[in-house]
Amino acid sequence: MTDIYLAGIKGGMKDEPKKFARWRSEMVEKQIVSRGVTDPLVLQAMVKVPRHLFVSEALVDSAYGDFPLPIGEGQTISQPFIIAEMSQCLELKGHERVLEIGTGSGYQAAVLAQIAYKVYTIERNNTLFLQTRKLFDKLKYYNIVTRYSDGTQGWKEESPFDAIMVTAGGQQIPAPLIDQLSIGGRLVMPVGGTFSQELLKLEKTETGIKTSNLGACRFVKLIGQHGWDE
Ligand code: SAH
């Protein structure tokens, strides 16, 4: 498996020190493949996206560690394995329009942008929104569209979406997001209390909605009309 996805893939940016590509490969091998993520598109995306550019300079050397990291404004970027697992469960092939709620550092959106056709991402914190919008431009992620608003209401004008990922936890899946998911679409979101949640995957079919539980997780709060109060 490892040989297949790593063969011929040159992770990395043109001008970055070589250690970063090595750290990324190690991250994918030791934290992600070893825990059972197999989707080659997800693994390739994570070998490529320079996670260290999505954290503050002081955290660059910790960027590929097996843990979440602070990104300012009291928010966090998820552990690499969680990013991989959530990405895999959207079952992306390349043609999809994906909605992400909670842009944060932009790392998750950048991973999705490697795999999907277009990523729509919403952030409610203006500081993070502005900072990350700038970063997407700098890194030339031209298939990521950003919006500053309450993501619990979705993005109606651009709906329906083939896949939706919510990267903050709420008591339930916001109804507008289920409405804005296409038939055959997948949605993933942490659902539960403020301290811990269960990662839920929802599949929308002609006949109804199928939900599966991917296990316990811990995310920051989803704040908004269909989420927690501020
Ligand atoms: N996907 C991000 C994770 C950031 S943490 C990354 O890769 O870095 C979750 C983010 O969700 C925070 O930035 C928080 O401000 C944002 N958030 C919380 N509630 C939101 C809402 N209703 N709409 C949009 N963003 C929200």
Image: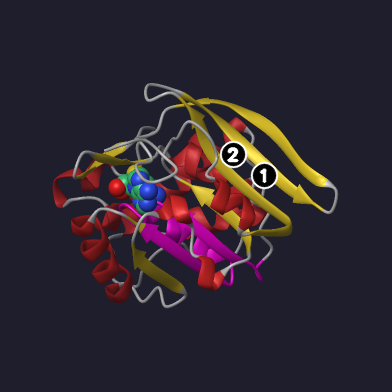
Q: Nearer the viewer, residue 160 or 92?
A: 160
Give yes or no for residue 156 being in the magenta stretch. no
Amino acid type of the residue tagged 1 in the rendering: Thr
- As rendered, which of 39 and 91 lies closer to the eye? 91
**108 is higher (above) or lower (below) than 216:** below
Image location (x, y in percent) of residue 209 = 75, 43
* Residues marked 1 and 2 touching at CB (< 8 Å): yes
Residue 162, relative to residue 26: is it above or below? below
Horizontal and vertical percent position of residue 211 = 71, 36
Q: Residue furthest front?
A: 225
Q: Does 188 sit left or right of 57 as displayed?
A: right
Residue at left offset 52%, top offset 66% = 156
The C terminus lies in quadrant: top left
Please name the residue that numbered disc 1 is placed on: 38
- Residue beneath the point at 85% across and 48% down: 207
Residue 224 position in % (x across, y down): 36, 45
Left or right of 195? Residue 189 is right
Depth check: give the residue in front, 33 or 102: 102
Q: Residues within 10 Å of mark 1 (few under 14, many from 20)?
A: some
Residue 33 visible somewhere in the drawing: yes
Instruction: Estimate the spatial distance between the alpha carbons at disc 1 and disc 2, rounded to whole Å.
Output: 6 Å
Q: Which mark is residue 33?
A: 2
* 186 lies left or right of 173: right
One can see residue 9 in this view: no
Q: Please give the range of residues in magenta.
A: 94-122
Q: Residue 228 sits in which quadrant?
A: top left
Q: Specify whether tag 2 is near ligand 1 (CB below 8 Å).
A: no
Q: Residue furthest right?
A: 207
Instruction: Inspect the image, locate mark 2, and give the three-letter code of the amino acid beneath it.
Output: Val
